[in-house]
Amino acid sequence: MKLDSLIPAPLRKPAKPGQGDGAKGAAPADLKTAPERPSEAQKLGDRAKEAPADVLAWVDQRTAASGFLTGMLYRKVPKGTNWFYTLGSATLFAFIVQAVTGVFLAMFYVPSPTEAYASISHINNEVFLGQFVHGMHKWGSSVMVIMIFLHMGRTFFFGAYKYPRELNWVIGVVLLILTMTMAFTGYLLPFDQRSFWASVVGININGTGPVLGPYLSDFLRAGPELGATTLSRFYAIHMLLIPGALIALIGAHLYLVVKLGTTAPPWLKAERPKNARPMSRLEGGANGGASRR
Amino acid sequence: MARLADEANKRNGAETGPTEREKPAPPGYFEGESMTRRRVFTVAAQGLGGVAGAAIVLPAVGFAVAPIFHRGKERWEEVGALDDFVADTYRQVVFTETEGIADAGKTTAYVRKGSRELGEDPSEIVAISNRCAHLGCPVRFVEAAGNFICPCHGGVYDFVGKVLGGPPVRPLDRFQTRIRGGRVEVGPRYSVTSQLDPVRARDPGEFTGGIWEYLYPPRPSTFPPPSGG
């Protein structure tokens, strides 16, 4: 509870009804004896202790963010919430890993067809922890795709896509598509044999769409063949275009999650309040309705 | 809704029928004006915002989309002397198809002379691309079988590149060829229909001939096919 005193009042968890010490009017027993006056050092110490709370309060006064934060942090979750509900957070965590490791990989990577492979070798073989960071990014992309599908499965099988959460499902599908696009564009960047031919095949699959497919292929390749600008184009899409859209949509996705709340698992029946009267008694049924449920 | 309101009014002894209250005129209104000052400014501000947005977005989109409409320079590369090639088997040649990306821009063609047995002109040179017409993997000519075989998904083509089996949707692409001073030169890529009629180059996975010419339209970035085959 010591931590509680550090949290500014607006950010504290709202008290549950019926709690509190109750003895409102009782005077402290030692009211008669005059308390010792605190020394200057004590006063300074007290003030220093309140500094974090003061800073938070200063920010809160100017942003009024505490209402949003308390609403988000202390929101109600339904009974029966279980480990399956963590898959969304796991996906978010995978995304954060990708974002952080991606930023550091970009410090060494050169998106040029003649130097890309050499720069990746440099990261893997010479940069301190380079292989580890590259490995996190490489395997993390698979983790993110797997997590997003598991999260989608949870949402589907728990019926959490139903009213009023349809829009969040739609946003989630867009996020899935963007994640797959990230995985696709990132695959080319090492520019080794595997990524080259995988991208050739992937672009050609895009091209099999009727009417617009051929033009989509040309757009992705920036020309009729995989060429000098294809790699930088994929790099720009992978680094700038999609991450921006991903972050914005993740924000919208989370906003709706907090706003609408999570669903209870489908196996949980609605609970009757303990002191609720049976319906049959209200309707004047025989036997007081006690035997009927 | 209006009917219910009317009934309620009747019950309350109030006047029925449409009760149009006159809207108060906005400040600065004068008789006969068709658009308020506020509306003029709203429309003007939104219009200007739209123009400013378009000035940023349109060039950016154009910049990204322009390569679709750009056709590169026609490239011809010498791949050997005329005497190096025979009519009954292929010789593998490697040449640059896309410049500026080093080895990644190179491609492989299987080249032979025209064969009289197949009804071809012996003076012409046939250059078949090794790019599989399924999804673009490199096919290999297997001498013993006389077939082209793709390692990715098992596409098989016969000696002239027609599909024998597997997922490919059309025969193997070809390259234009010419003979300059006894040397064989290889030029732009073109695709063929199932009857080996030349059409503009299509990407792998796209059908050619008949209605497919419209469902997979030729791209402006490709070269016209050789006339007359």
Image (cartoon, coloured by chain):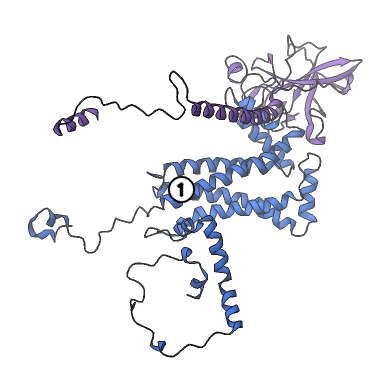
Q: Establish if B16 lies above or below A25.
A: above
Q: Height in image: A167 above or below B79?
A: below
Which shade of the palette goes to chain B?
Answer: purple
Q: Quadrant of the N terminus of chain B?
A: top left
Q: Is residue A146 visible?
A: yes
Q: In the displayed structure, does residue A107 sit left or right of residue A187?
A: right
The residue lying furthest to the top in this view is: B228
The image quadrant of residue A248 is top right
Residue A48 screen position, x and y as percent: 60, 74
Q: Position of residue A42 (x, y in %)?
A: 58, 82
- Label count reads 1
The answer to whether residue A194 is above or below residue B66 is: below
In the figure, residue B86 lies in which quadrant? top right
Give left or right: position of B29 versus B135: left
* Residue B229 locus on image (x, y percent): 73, 11
Say which residue label 1 marks. A256
Question: Is label 1 in a helix, a strand or a loop?
Answer: helix
The chain carrying label 1 is A
B18 and B73: which one is in front? B18
Of A180 and B15, nearer the camera is B15
Q: Residue sitting at 78 percent across and 39 percent down?
A: A113
What amino acid is at disc 1?
Leu
- Is residue B134 among the parts visible in the rendering? no
Left or right, residue B101 beside residue A24: right
Furthest residue in direction right, as rendered: B181
Residue at 36% from the left image edge and 28% from the top image edge: B23
User: Mark 1, residues whose alpha carbon is within 10 Å: few (<14), some, or many (≥20)?
Assistant: some
Q: Position of residue A286 (x, y in %)?
A: 7, 57
Residue sitting nearer the eye, B101 or B39: B39
Chain A image colour: blue
